Image (cartoon, grey):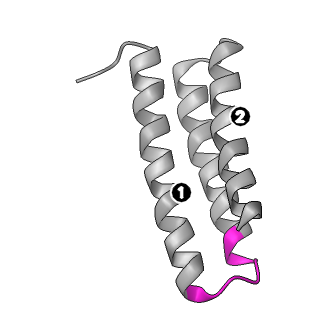
Amino acid sequence: MNDFINLKNSYVATIQMGLMMNAGYEEAKRGNDIIHKFCENYIDNSNYSDFDKQKMKHELELVKEALSQEIDRYFHRVG
């Protein structure tokens, strides 16, 4: 499970670093989509049980949504 925690933390850090390095709005949104898909594929190819995989993918979906909202707030595109 530590692998998943590291994966999730790296996902968040990568998006936040992109924002700090002045990535554009569309670039940040696409990055969020691409990294999310990469993480899902990583989980699908792991040795975790199907139940754990579903749980992790659900948590990743929540992370993706939170990051999407953070990107919108960063670029003042809320509401």
Is residue 4 placed above or below 54 in the rendered structure? above
User: Quadrant where the N terminus lies?
Assistant: bottom right
> Percent x, y for residue 47?
76, 83
Please name the residue that numbered disc 2 is placed on: 14
Please name the residue that numbered disc 1 is placed on: 60
Magenta segment = 43-50
Asked whether, in this view, residue 2 is left or right of residue 68, the answer is: right
Is residue 60 placed above or below 31 in the rendered structure? below
Q: State the residue at coordinates (47%, 56%).
A: 61
Magenta residues, dominant SS class: loop
Q: Residues within 10 Å of mark 1 (few under 14, many from 20)?
A: many
Query: Looking at the image, how many numbered discs can be counted on the residues?
Result: 2
> Percent x, y for residue 70?
45, 27
> Percent x, y for residue 10?
73, 43
Q: State the residue at coordinates (69%, 82%).
A: 48
Could you say which quadrant of the image residue 42 lies in? Answer: bottom right
